[in-house]
Image (spheres, rainbow, N blue to C red):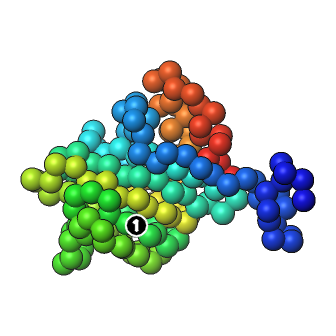
Amino acid sequence: MPKDQPNLMPGAEGVGPDIYSHAIPTDEREWVPARNFPGDNLNVWIRPLMFNTVTGAGANLLRIRGSGVVSRHLHTGPVQGFVLKGSWRYLEHDWVAREGDYIYEPAGEVHTLVVDEGVEEMMTYFTALGTVMFVDDKDEVVGYEDIFKRKAMCRAHYREMGLDESYLDRITR
């Protein structure tokens, strides 16, 4: 096998090379404000790590400094998370996710992520498959975000900040 070709299983040609990057940025500008979320979320930020435009999957860090809320929503596919820093909870559950905890969310579960007062910073690594649908208190869809919308949001932010947009292309499959 040529050195410039990844070592892939037969039939896996065309999947693209591995993605390797430093997940937690040293440049604060690389944190993208989560403006697609409904409501006032000025302290909710994401760090994109992977966009899979074929499957609709994505990976990112979610960071909230101080208290904050990610509006009521559901995912069309499963979500997995691992808490790196701080703590958070869902209004709809009686548990608190703390540093070192793993979370699995089944597709279709409605929840509201909350970081309570007194938490200096929360950071969680999430992988998600599919679209996030924001819903009101009657479960009516009021907005959505898919991989394409998220990538466009990140690209606009990188452009505005004068950052190298090629990072976003390198993490896209």
Task: Locate residue 56 relative to residue 161 in the image: left or right.
Answer: right
Which corner quadrant of the image does residue 56 belong to?
bottom right
Which corner quadrant of the image does residue 119 belong to?
bottom left
Q: Is residue 135 visible?
A: no
Q: Residues within 10 Å of mark 1 (few under 14, many from 20)?
A: many
Q: Is residue 68 above or below residue 78?
A: above
- Which residue corresponds to the image point at 45% horizontal and 24% vertical from the top-left? 161
Which corner quadrant of the image does residue 54 belong to?
bottom right
Q: Is residue 18 above or below residue 78?
A: above
Number of numbered discs on residues: 1
Residue 68 vs residue 85, the one in the foreground: 85
- Which residue corresponds to the image point at 55% horizontal and 34% vertical from the top-left? 155
Quick one: quadrant of the N terminus?
Answer: bottom right
From the image, tell me which residue sits under label 1.
Answer: 81
Task: Locate residue 112 relative to residue 153 in the image: left or right.
Answer: left
Q: Is residue 160 above or below residue 88?
A: above
Amino acid marked by disc 1: Gly
- Which residue corresponds to the image point at 51% horizontal and 26% vertical from the top-left? 163
Q: Is residue 97 visible?
A: yes
Residue most extreme to the left? 118
Task: Locate residue 82 relative to residue 96 in the image: left or right.
Answer: right
Q: Is residue 95 above or below residue 54?
A: below
- Which residue corresponds to the image point at 27% horizontal and 39% vertical from the top-left? 42
Q: How far across and how far down the image is residue 50, in percent?
A: 57, 52
Q: How far across and how far down the image is residue 135, in percent?
A: 37, 61
Q: How far across and how far down the image is residue 149, in percent?
A: 55, 46
Residue most extreme to the right? 1
SS label for mark 1: strand
Task: Locate residue 58 relative to residue 43 in the image: left or right.
Answer: right
